[in-house]
Amino acid sequence: MPAKPPTLPDAAGDFAHALLAWYRENYRPLPWREEPSLYRTVVSEFMCQQTQIATVLPYFARWMQALPDFAALASAPEEQVVKLWEGLGYYSRARNLHKLAKQWMAAKPKPQTAEAWRAFPGVGPYTAAAIASIAFGEKSAVVDGNVVRILARLTNDQQEFTDNGKAVKVFTALADELIQHTAEPGDHNQAMMELGATICAKANPQCLLCPVRGFCAGYREADPAQLPRMRKKSVINRRIDRVFLAHEGCLLVHQIPKTARRLAGMCELPPAELLSVAYPAELILTRRRGIANERIEERFLHVEWSPAIEKFVGGEETLFWQPVAELDAITLTGPHRKWLSELLNSKPR
Ligand code: SF4
């Protein structure tokens, strides 16, 4: 009779051992791993939320050069912090990181546990567990979409989840159980992240290269690419018309109010609906972007300057004229900086 395959959580010790051995041989040499410190761990965790590592790398390097430690970040002006983040998206992360540095400088005693770290702005259960395990060796498991995917496949879990948050709750107990079986919780968590990023990928898991294939019920009994089973989110389609108006070497720009839920304080080309004066307009560019489950089509309309527009701009505090030669001085959203460069190069003013 063939031996029963090892399953989780019974084989947790062997699983943790195999995972760690693979990680030690195969981890990507990222700057915050090569030269670790608490500050570098915190910054990298904030930057890597919802953002790919390849995108983060140049931002991390520039950030460390400008703001090398908590003290430098805490005393930096907010404009510099947000400017260094320009293009990374989800700007509340930058503002929260700034607040965190100020609070950390004032904190006595300095926080070490995941529970204590959760009191800081922008630090949820995942980030708290990552910081506490990597910087302080606490056995706190990180659980995000990557870890859910690995655990759902390892256990061939066929239940359907309505959203990622519910799946995280379901798999947290197993993740916590697994991390108890290692002496290196920081590396264990990083190994789970690395496995999800490089081997147990969403669409095409590389099962034949996987160091924990022997523990994987999904590989043995199902099509792991179909796991976890998530209910599809409905997509909302929106269209926004934008004004491209340059006059005497300046460009009309809109600053999103600081109280806005998204992109607070950032600059973009003005929404056409904001300019409640009549003007002729010519469609010159159409681009698309996605924010959460929204698919947004942005249409850029070339508008000629007129005294009526000038008067309107003077009375609208979120609109202003920015010299084209000094666009680097303001913080534009990533897509708008890119599209603006296309517009300015195609329509020199
Ligand atoms: S065997 Fe395949 S599905 Fe299972 S954990 Fe490894 S990569 Fe993922």
Image: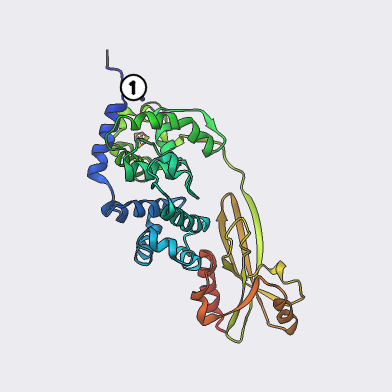
At 70% from the left edge and 78% from the top edge, which residue is drawn?
A: 314
Residue 104: x, y in percent? 42, 52
Instruction: Please say whether residue 328 is visible from this viewpoint.
Output: yes
Residue 284: x, y in percent? 62, 73
User: In the displayed structure, does residue 81 sit left or right of residue 197?
Assistant: right
Extreme residue toward the bottom, this view:
248
Instruction: Please say whether residue 199 is visible from this viewpoint.
Output: no
Residue 311: x, y in percent? 74, 80
Extreme residue toward the top, this view:
1
Q: Quadrant of ligand 1?
A: top left
Residue 162, placed above or below residue 109: above
Compare residues 285 and 317 and report the one nearer the observer. Answer: 317
Residue 220, placed above or below residue 206: above
The amino acid marked with disc number 1 is Asp
Compare residues 270 and 6 and report the one nearer the observer. Answer: 270
Compare residues 258 and 71 and report the one nearer the observer. Answer: 71
At 33% from the left edge and 46% from the top edge, which residue is drawn?
A: 135
Residue 158: x, y in percent? 48, 28
Quadrant holding the N terminus: top left
Residue 276, placed above or below residue 96: below
At 60% from the left edge and 54% from the top edge, which residue is drawn?
A: 295
Q: How is the image coloured?
A: rainbow
Label 1 CA crowd tier, 10 Å (few <14, some 14–19, many 20+): few
Compare residues 261 and 309 and report the one nearer the observer. Answer: 261
User: In the displayed structure, does residue 104 sit left or right of residue 238?
Assistant: left
Report the number of discs.
1
On whether ligand 1 comes within 8 Å of the CB at mark 1, the answer is no
At 70% from the left edge and 73% from the top edge, which residue is drawn?
A: 316
Tag 1 residue: 10
Quadrant holding the C terminus: bottom right
Label 1, secondary structure: give it. Answer: loop
